[in-house]
Image: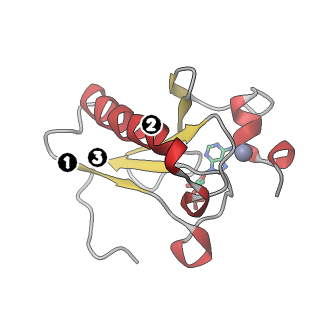
Amino acid sequence: MNASECIFCKIVAREISSKIVYEDEKIIAIEDINPAAPLHILLIPKQHIASLNEVEEQDAGILGHIQLTASRIAKKKGISKKGYRVVNNCGVWGGQTIAHLHYHLLGGREMAWPPG
Ligand code: AMP
Ligand code: ZN
């Protein structure tokens, strides 16, 4: 899939609507359309990177920024004390369904381990 057909690139460009929780020049965070937990937010770099398989040294800043933002959103949403999960699904066996790098922030209920 190229970037012009990508759902998350379209969300970044406001061609598809979404519930935006946070945005800055590098990333956007939106509510997941099909939540798997009481709080389910997707953190998405604005740059089209297909998956964690494609990241390079130059992407280290954005990866760190996503984690810091997940931590801040978790605090702001009141889930940090009890805890939460940040997940990246990579590739077919990882369960990735949208080929634009994103991290799931899941909270508001106790998580099971190992994941399915
Ligand atoms: P993954 O399976 O890791 O690729 O995650 C893709 C996630 O994107 C799933 O949790 C979907 O529910 C979510 N999703 C798909 N389309 C949209 C959309 N238009 N707005 C918000 N979330 C979406
Ligand atoms: Zn994209």
Q: Earlier in the sequence, mark 3 or mark 2?
A: 2
Number of marks in the rendered image: 3
- Inspect the image, locate mark 1, and give the three-letter code of the amino acid beneath it: Gly
Task: Give percent across and percent down for residue 23.
Answer: 53, 23
- Inspect the image, locate mark 2, and give the three-letter code of the amino acid beneath it: Gly
- Point 45% across, 37% down: residue: 61
What colouring method underlies this structural image? secondary structure
Look at the numbered discs 3 and 2 and tell me whether their residues touch, using CB distance below 8 Å. no
Between 30 and 101, the one nearer to me in the picture:
101
| Mark sitting on residue 83 | 1
Mark 1 nearby-residue class (10 Å; few <14, some 14–19, many ≥20): some
Q: Is residue 106 left or right of residue 24?
A: left
Q: Which residue is mark 3?
A: 108
In the current view of this chain or complex, which residue is farthest to the front? Answer: 57
Which circle, 3 or 2, is nearer the viewer?
2
Q: Which residue is mark 2?
A: 61
Q: Report helix, strand or loop for mark 3.
A: loop
Check the picture and name the quadrant holding the C terminus. Answer: bottom left
